[in-house]
Image (spheres, rainbow, N blue to C red):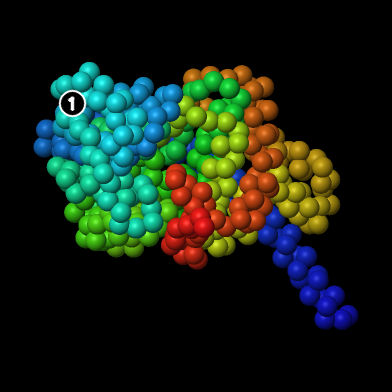
Amino acid sequence: MSWWWISLVYLTEGLAAFGIGLETALLTMHFCSVIYSKLYMNKKPPDLMKAEIEGVSLLKPLKGVDPNLEDNLETFFEIDYPQYEILFCIQDQDDPAVEVVKRLIKKHPGIDARIVSGGKRVGANPKINNLMPGYEVMKYNLFWICDSGIRVLPLTLRDMVSKMTDKVALVHAVPYTSNRKGFSSTVEKIYFGTQHTRVYISAHLIGFICMTGMSTLLRKDYFDKCTGGLGKLSQYIAEDYFMAKVLSDNGYKLTLASYPALQNSGNYGIGSFVQRMIRWTKLRVAMVPMAVILEPFSECFLSGLVFSWSCLHFFRWNMLVVFLYHVLVWFVLDYILFRQLENGHLQMSKCDFLVAWFVRETLTPYIILSALWDPTISWRTGKYRLRCGGKAEEVLDV
């Protein structure tokens, strides 16, 4: 028997074993995320003792106005927490968001809130440039960075602070979405309530850094000690990942909030969702190059094909039957996880869920190929080229 034939046999056996191992790992992720969400998500936080209450500075980066901005911002004036300030960071004093914020400050005079404008360019990342003046004048050691498109529940901050024990330096929230109208909103909601949450929770359980900084509470003393300050992260577009990595590398713990980060931007659609997924894929490829190889195999259809072929190879089982059972089990587990994130109160029919789930799954190949085709990132007002390791340089139009 020739060497190439032996090599082919070993390769085939190895690929078949990979398919079985992959299915086992993915099912484990499914079950772990379902159990975790049942036990820990959407749980009312404990009452804080007076000695446990720390002041919190909320840094809120704003640029422009979308249809839901005022409603979203008002939820931060209605937080059930005794001691916090809101610093609205707006780079351009003529930004229309200024008028929205002024109306809310006038409407809620009992809340310590103000506008910090002007920005400060410290690097390529426009979000950090916008936040720097607020970061430099905030009152409290605990600071909360929360994106403009997020709305919160009254107990959100109390929950996050309750998770901030002595060894914890960062509390972050599982990205999710509010209930909005339209099919595109349903697709986005299902993505964040199934695939993204499954990976997010599984990474948290095994200690792998997976963080989206839509809503993040940090300790300034720990943070400054490890990073040298917020401005030091301005060389990265994915500053949230690197702030978590630096803190973790220095021995501090990261933990998850009980309440998810409820995205509620008024501007949304299938096209904008796809573009955001492409941008996130480019970031993952730059920061973790192996992601481009492994990530497609974490999706339902490709992993099902690999697994069904492995079952044919080892057990002579019918590929089509195995594939259909795989998809059915995957779908049911996704639906259960989605119900957990929705806290049991679904705002869509099972048919709507099925159609949107299928569309989301079939978009993945296009998203990955598009991310590989063009490595530059368009974000906010600029274009950026990512170097290996995640550092960014701005691309200037000639």
Q: Name the residue: 39% across, 33% down.
A: 64
Which of the 4 image quarters holds residue 150? top left
- Left or right: 299, with 116 as reference point: right
Outermost residue toward the bottom in this view: 2
Type of the residue with mark 1? Ile
- Left or right: 326, with 123 as reference point: right
Outermost residue toward the left in this view: 51
Outermost residue toward the front in this view: 398
Which of the 4 image quarters holds residue 40? top left
Q: Is residue 58 visible?
A: no
Residue 12 drawn at (x, y percent): 78, 65
Q: Which residue is mark 1?
A: 111
Residue 276 drawn at (x, y percent): 53, 43
Residue 220 drawn at (x, y percent): 21, 51
Task: Identify whether 40 is placed above or below 127.
Answer: above
Figure quadrant of the N terminus: bottom right
Residue 302 drawn at (x, y percent): 71, 49
Q: Is residue 82 visible?
A: yes
Q: Name the residue: 55% across, 62% down.
A: 289
- Left or right: 226, with 26 as reference point: left
Task: Identify whether 106 is placed above or below 9.
Answer: above
- Left or right: 199, with 222 as reference point: right
Which of the 4 image quarters holds residue 144? top left
Label 1: few (<14), some or many (≥20) within 10 Å? some
Q: Secondary structure at mark 1?
A: loop
In the foreground, 397 or 288: 397
Task: Identify whether 179 is placed above or below 206.
Answer: above
Q: Name the residue: 21% across, 60% down.
A: 225
